């Protein structure tokens, strides 16, 4: 007797439908990969239009919410239109949002395949599709869409489900999610009971780091290099401030997270510029700091802590002015009450489909899933893909997706949704 022999009729219908629709699902994904949606520059309307057309061809009613130009510009983008599909099953029940982002980082160098070709090749894991965004996260446009179609097929065949599935496809994850999920929530366009955001197949991400970016401006006074005492050296002062910041980095390394997959709080200075010429005392230096907060630091004033370190060090250099300006603040993601039900069904279904242990863990990255938890919505990341971002070569050349994982992850999501609505 096989595992399939023990399935109930709903499970059988879901599995069989997803297997039957595999070629169509892969073709759907290929069409999404073929339309560039690089961010930057962030001109994503063409992709939104293509995604909408594909969804409508499948019979969905698609809401297209074009982001106002002022908000798009403020996000550093050119165009974005958020898409929502709502499918009601039965009456009442939970509202479950599934969000994937269609914007992607530019391809960069080193590709051996066309980044917009959606080429399929062979690997030890079976067929693989190549292309920018095929794993992060255009794949989950396909995962969530075909999981919903499978549920619709089960309903046609008599399955009694109660709940609403919302497909939410947005276009600003690479710039923080403020005009994507956050805007949908701010405008009251969605009020889900649970949210699933794009992720990978072999683990359920229930927590991730937060991120703070600040720009520090150090202002001195220019002077002739032959008479350096006539100026106030901004580079020397910035060096002193940077030493204090690196002292904070050592302190952050002692702040350990209890979440599997996340180590400790971090800090990095990734960009610096300043000076006028070799023979001039420099009057201005700017640098940017990346501070990653562990989930335990939700609500902690990481910006205030960093600002205090900078201002104290600057005060020790007479004649120096300093300004600290926030660029990005993304709070960490953490497990909320009620998320255990979402985790439990995804974990049990994934372990049955994949036949391996599916851990619940955190990641040191940050995503726009945090916008859902900030509203008190239990949220996890789960979708199609291998165990790690490195295996998928996300944000790298020859990004790829194992198509067997797409098929299996779609089954997991469909079965878990059926559990939640059953």
Image (cartoon, grey):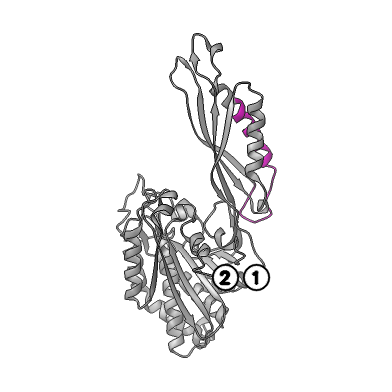
Can the viewer see residue 367?
Answer: yes
Tag shown at residue 194? 2
Q: Quadrant of residue 317?
A: top right
The answer to whether the residues at label 1 and label 2 have Cβ atoms under 8 Å apart is: yes
**Can the viewer see residue 124 in this picture?**
no
- Kindly identify which residue carries mark 1: 338
Residue 417 versus residue 226: which sits nearer the camera? 226
Disc 1 is placed on an element classified as loop
The percent position of residue 28, horizontal first and vertical second, equals: 34, 69
Q: Badge 1: few (under 14), some or many (20 or more) residues near its Cα, within 10 Å? A: some
Residue at 45%, 14% (x, y): give it: 279
Residue 109: image quadrant is top left
Is residue 241 inside the magenta stretch? yes
Q: Identify the magenta region.
A: 240-264
- Residue 378: % across, % down: 60, 67
- Pick out the residue farthest to the top: 226
Of label 1 and label 2, which has the lower sequence position?
A: 2
- In the displayed structure image, the side of residue 130 where residue 248 appears, left or right: right
Question: Looking at the figure, which quarter contains the C terminus?
Answer: bottom right
Label 1 and label 2: CA atoms lie apart by 9 Å
Q: Position of residue 292 (x, y in %)?
A: 59, 46
Q: Secondary structure at mark 2?
A: strand
Q: Is residue 332 above or below residue 422?
A: above
Q: Nearer the viewer, residue 261 or 206?
A: 206
In the image: residue 125, left or right of residue 332? left
Task: Give the answer, above or below, for where 234 lies relative to 192.
Answer: above
């Amino acid at each position: 007797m096989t595992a399939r022999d023990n399935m109930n009729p709903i499970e059988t219908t879901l599995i069989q439908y997803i297997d039957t629709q595999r070629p169509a699902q892969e073709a759907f994904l290929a069409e999404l990969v073929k339309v560039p949606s690089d961010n930057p520059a962030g001109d994503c309307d063409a992709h939104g239009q293509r995604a909408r057309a594909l969804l409508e061809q499948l019979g969905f009613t698609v809401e297209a919410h074009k982001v106002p130009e002022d908000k798009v510009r403020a996000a550093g983008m050119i165009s974005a239109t958020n898409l929502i599909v709502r499918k009601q099953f039965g009456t009442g029940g939970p509202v479950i949002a599934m969000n994937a982002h269609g914007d992607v980082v530019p391809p960069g160098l080193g590709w051996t395949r066309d980044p917009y070709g959606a080429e399929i090749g062979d690997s030890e894991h079976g067929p693989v599709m190549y292309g920018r965004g095929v794993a992060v996260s255009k794949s989950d446009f396909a995962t969530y869409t075909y999981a919903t179609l499978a549920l619709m097929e089960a309903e046609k065949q008599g399955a009694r489900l109660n709940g609403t599935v919302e497909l939410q496809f947005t276009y600003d994850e690479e710039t923080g999610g403020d005009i994507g999920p956050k805007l949908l929530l701010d405008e009251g366009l969605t009020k889900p009971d649970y949210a699933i955001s794009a992720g990978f197949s072999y683990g359920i991400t229930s927590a991730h780091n937060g991120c703070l970016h600040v720009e520090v401006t150090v202002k001195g006074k220019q002077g002739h290099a032959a008479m350096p005492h006539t100026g106030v050296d901004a580079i020397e002062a910035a060096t002193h401030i940077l030493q204090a910041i690196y002292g904070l980095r050592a302190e952050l390394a002692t702040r350990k997270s209890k979440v599997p997959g996340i180590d400790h709080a971090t800090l990095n200075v990734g960009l610096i510029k300043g000076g006028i010429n070799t023979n001039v005392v420099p009057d201005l230096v700017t640098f940017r700091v990346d501070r990653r907060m562990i989930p335990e630091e939700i609500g902690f004033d990481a910006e205030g802590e960093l600002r205090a370190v900078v201002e104290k060090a600057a005060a020790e250099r007479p004649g120096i002015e300093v300004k600290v300006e926030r660029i990005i603040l993304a709070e960490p993601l953490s497990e909320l009450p009620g998320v255990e039900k979402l985790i439990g069904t995804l974990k049990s279904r994934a372990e049955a489909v994949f036949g391996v242990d599916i851990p619940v863990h955190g990641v040191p990255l940050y995503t726009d899933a945090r916008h859902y938890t900030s509203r008190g919505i239990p949220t996890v990341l789960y979708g199609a893909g291998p165990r790690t971002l490195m295996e998928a070569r996300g944000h790298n050349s020859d990004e790829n997706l194992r198509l067997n994982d797409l098929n299996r992850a779609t089954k997991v999501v469909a079965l878990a949704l059926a559990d939640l609505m059953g």
